[in-house]
Amino acid sequence: MEAAVTDEDLAGERGQGIQVIARAARVLDVLGGRPDGMSLGEIAKEVDLPRSTVQRIVKALADEELVRTGRADGVRLGPAFLRLVGKLHTDVVAVAAPHLQLLSDDIGETVTLGRISGRELAFIHVVVAEQELRVVPRVGANLPLATTAGGRALLALGTDGEASILLQLPDARVTDGNELPKELKRVRRIGYAVDDNETTPGVVSLAVGIDTILGRFAVSVPAPAVRVAAASRSRIVERLLACRDVLLGEIGRNRPDE
């Protein structure tokens, strides 16, 4: 005769299942920060679990190809996990587009979503303002990272060392390599970047960087300089920062602990 299963038994099983999922998520999160691979001991130390427990979790994840094992460089994220990320990555524009449209409607200006492409800033989505005098960037157009608001916002998400690599490249189109580190420091301090008639005469651009689990992006507002007075600039920045926070919540922060 089989023993009766109580509600307490079911609750206990559910609790154990949730704990296993949470621990597996912690392991995947740690591996995500170490694309070069980690040993079981290193993982155990990072997630504060016994090595034997980590070994069981890693084996289960490896069975589903969520991690790769048996390599000289240890445990790494596997093809199944990367395929999932790839599917999400294609939807970044779909996730961001409604919020960019709301931002454009709110401030009455063009809004762009850009990312680093090689050594330049590339627009991957553009919402054009409903005004006679407006800025119309072209999707796919590439602009210099160092002098555009979006490019500076993206560079500021990284380290000065990462930015300096671009400064050493002959086609990076840096007008003053000594000034860029100061500008990036300023962007990090105030939270947004400015291109005041530098890339295109008569156009002022304001931008924020977004460091997500799916990559780094910049939301920019390029507008005719005649409309970007001190009061309107402050309002645009306020709305840009709010849009950034919404998108980080929708897509996920790259470093959620910060």
Image (cartoon, rainbow, N blue to C red):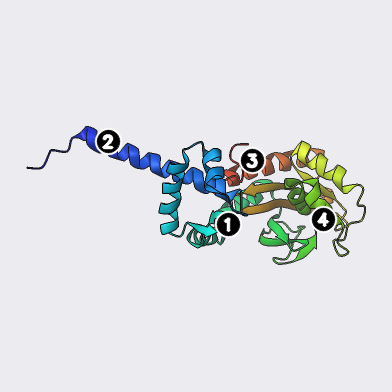
**Contact check, label 4 and label 1, Cβ < 8 Å:** no
Q: Can you tell which of label 3 and label 2 is closer to the viewer?
A: 2
Marks 3 and 4, the one that precedes in the sequence: 4
Inspect the image, locate mark 2, and give the three-letter code of the amino acid beneath it: Ala
What is the crowding at mark 4: few (fewer than 14 residues within 10 Å), some, or many (at least 20)?
A: few
Q: Nearer the viewer, residue 81 or 120?
A: 81
Q: Is 85 displayed left or right of 234 in the figure?
A: left
**Contact check, label 2 and label 1, Cβ < 8 Å:** no
The residue pinned by badge 3 equals: 242
**Contact check, label 3 and label 1, Cβ < 8 Å:** no
Q: Residue at x 51, y 59 (%)?
A: 70
Q: What secondary structure is found at the residue carrying circle 4?
A: helix
Q: Where residue 11 is drawn, which disc sits there?
A: 2
User: From where the camera sits, is residue 77 visible?
Assistant: yes
Marks 4 and 2, the one that precedes in the sequence: 2
Give how far apart the Cα atoms at labels 4 and 1 are. 27 Å
Inspect the image, locate mark 3, and give the three-letter code of the amino acid beneath it: Ala
**Contact check, label 4 and label 2, Cβ < 8 Å:** no
Q: What secondary structure is found at the residue carrying circle 2?
A: helix
Marks 2 and 1, the one that precedes in the sequence: 2
The residue pinned by badge 4 equals: 165
What is the crowding at mark 1: few (fewer than 14 residues within 10 Å), some, or many (at least 20)?
A: some
The residue pinned by badge 1 equals: 92
Q: Where residue 2 is drawn, which disc sits there?
A: none
Give the quarter of the image for residue 191: top right
Q: Residue at x 49, y 59 (%)?
A: 84
Q: Is residue 178 above or below residue 73?
A: above
Q: Is 206 displayed left or right of 30 in the figure?
A: right
